[in-house]
Amino acid sequence: MPSLPGPDLGDPDHGAGEPGARGITTPGSGESSPEAPAAARGDGTPDGTDWRTRALAAEERASQLEQELAVATAAIADVRRRLGESERRSEIDRELTRAGAIETESVSLLVERELERTPTSDVASAVAEVRRRKPVLFDGDPPPRRVRPWSMSPAAESRETTGDIATLARETGDRRLLMKYLRARRGEP
């Protein structure tokens, strides 16, 4: 047979007939062409990591973030609960002070128990109920607020007699009036 011009296919210099040469892949040779994408090969080369590895890492990170979210949500709920309890205790203490409770800590426990028993009632009505059931824990009537001037003129003080000051000190139990009476008795200003 006559020979055709061009490279000889049987020429060992060109290696065209060898399996795997010049990017030609033969089944079972285990080699792939350099143009084939790394992700398609699945060998985890630096050109592209294995998609399965990335998916597993993403799932692990997602579960880790879900756990962190659950912990943060529980912490927020705990802080809200404690804040609500603190606000409720403050409101109870204010109402007990207005009602004239002798010892607010002991009475506040009774008020909290009353609030647990009847959750629809407010703090003021619970304090009133405790005061109705246990009046011993409260002063008689809370003292009325006296409006006192910041300073009194000497002329106003001189009009009061020692007997008037003594009577007023005895009726109110005000120690400042008692001291004023004692000073007036000694003749001090």
Image (cartoon, rainbow, N blue to C red):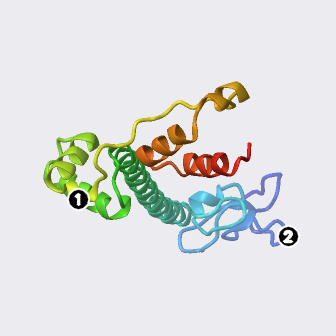
| Residue topped by disc 1 | 136
The residue depicted at 28 percent of the width and 44 percent of the height is: 123
Q: Earlier in the sequence, mark 1 or mark 2?
A: 2
Q: Is residue 153 left or right of residue 171?
A: right
| Residue topped by disc 2 | 13
Crowd rating for badge 2 (residues with CA inside 10 Å; few <14, some 14–19, many 20+): few
Which quadrant of the figure has residue 8? bottom right
Which one is nearer the viewer's eye here, 135 or 61? 135
Crowd rating for badge 1 (residues with CA inside 10 Å; few <14, some 14–19, many 20+): few
Callout 1 amino acid: Val
Q: How many marks?
A: 2
Callout 2 amino acid: Asp
The residue depicted at 65 percent of the width and 32 percent of the height is: 157
Q: Secondary structure at mark 2?
A: loop
Work out which quarter of the rendered image holds the C terminus and state it.
top right
Q: Is residue 31 above or below residue 172?
A: below
- Residue 169: x and y in percent read 49, 46
Q: Secondary structure at mark 1?
A: helix
The residue depicted at 46 percent of the width and 42 percent of the height is: 167
The residue depicted at 37 percent of the width and 62 percent of the height is: 105
**Alpha carbon separation for disc pair 1 and 2:** 117 Å
